[in-house]
Image (cartoon, grey):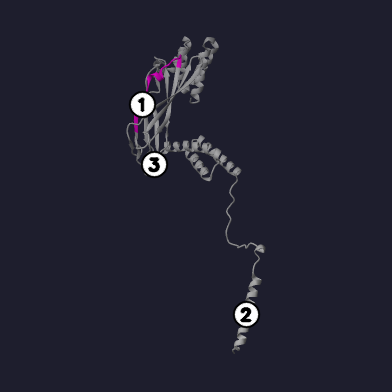
Amino acid sequence: MSLPRGRRIAAAALLLFTTVCASKEAEIDPYAAKPVVLRANVKEGPPSPDAATVAARAQSSFAAAQAAWSSGDALTALAIVNHAMLEGVPAELEGPFRDLRAKARASVVATKVCRVRAIAEKDAVADGDEIVVRLEFANLSTATLRVPRAQEGTSDALVVLQLVREDFDVYGNARSADFTLPSPVEQDLVLEPGRSHATRFTIPAELAKLSHQGLSVIRLGGAFRPVAIRVGDTELFDAIPIEKATVRVFMKGYEPMAADPFGSLKKAVEKRSPPHILTAAELLAPGDRPAARTILVAAKAKDEALTGSVDAALARLVALDAGR
C-alpha cells in the first residue's frame, strides 16, 4: 500500500533525523579513546644478550680457541674464532681474535695447501763456513698449485728468512742475536698434487763466525709472503710460516769429535780442555747423555778449575733434552 505524498515526505524526514542523531551518539571522544589491541599469532624472538653475556661468551670462545691452537689443532682454532666473530665480540677482544685467526689460517694453509721448509744441507758447520739452505715448496692439496712470482699492482713474492743465533761460551754465558734475510722468489711456481720445488739460499759466512770460545746454534725460520696462492678455484693470500731448521757452528777441527763424541768428552776432561768439553757434550747422541752427566759431575768434584766449563756443558745437555 502506498502512502499519500505528504506522509511520505514526513516519514523520510523522520528517518533522516533519526540517522543523524544516531551518528552523533556514535561519535568517539578522542581524549577518551583507548588503544585497540589486535591479537596475532606472532612469536617473539629471544632478547638480545647484554654486554656482560657477550663478553663472557667471547672470553670462553677465545680460551677454547687458544687451547686448540696450543694443542696444535689450527683447524679447530680457526673454526672457533670464525664462529665467535660472526656472533660478535667486544671491541677490546677484536685484536686478539684477529691475531689468532691470522695465525690459525696461516697454519691451515701450511698444513693443508702449501708447505714451505728450510732444509740445511749440513746440520753442523765449522767456524766461518757458509750455510747452504734449501727452501722447499710442496703442494699438499689435491689440485694444481699456482704461485705467481709477481702480479700487477702488488709487491713481488718474497721469502723472509728469520735467523736467530744463540752463542754459548765455556763460562756458561749465553747471548742471542736476530737477523732478517729477505730473498725474492725468482720464478712462478706450478706444482701438481704431491710435487715439490726447491731453491738454494746461502747464508753469508760472517753470520756463522765465532767470536767466543764455545759454539753457536742458528735457528732458521721466517715466512713466505706470496702475491697469491691459487689452488683449484680457490685463491689465498696468507703468509705461510717456514718450517724451522737448526744448524750448529763449532770451532774449526771439530769433525773428529763428531765421529766419537762420548770418547772425545772423556779425553777433553782428561786434558782439561773447556772448549772441547762443551763441543763434545753438544755432539753427544741422546742415549749417551746420562753417562756423560756422570762423567761431568765427577770431573767437577775432582777438578774445581773445570767447574765453569762443566756447568756450561751440563746446561746444554738439559737444553738438548728439552729440544732446545
Q: Nearer the viewer, residue 275 or 271?
A: 275
User: In the displayed structure, would residue 309 be above or below residue 49?
Assistant: above
Distance from label 1 to label 3 (Cα)? 27 Å
Question: Looking at this view, is 29 or 248 the one in front?
Answer: 29
Write down the residue under mark 3. Answer: 235
- Magenta segment, which residues? 197-214
Position of residue 260 in the picture relative to residue 97 (left or right): left
Comes first in the chain, label 2 or label 3: 2
Residue 309 x, y percent position in the rendering: 50, 14
**Going 59% across and 87% down the picture, which residue do you hit?**
5
Q: How many numbered tags mark residues here?
A: 3
Question: Where on the picture, by quarter, is residue 199?
Answer: top left
Look at the numbered disc 3 and give the secondary structure of its residue: strand
**Camera-nearest label, 1 or 2:** 2
Estimate the x, y position of residue 198 in percent, counting from the top left: 34, 31
Q: CA distance from mark 1 to mark 2?
A: 110 Å
Q: Is residue 199 magenta?
A: yes
Query: Residue at label 1?
Result: 201
Whether residue 16 is situated above or below residue 77 in the rendered picture: below
Residue indicated by mark 2 = 15
At x 62%, y 78%, the residue is 16
Q: Is residue 292 magenta?
A: no
Q: Residues within 10 Å of mark 1 (few under 14, many from 20)?
A: some
Image depth: mark 2 or mark 3 in front: 2
- The residue depicted at 43 percent of the width and 28 percent of the height is 221
Amino acid at circle 1? Phe
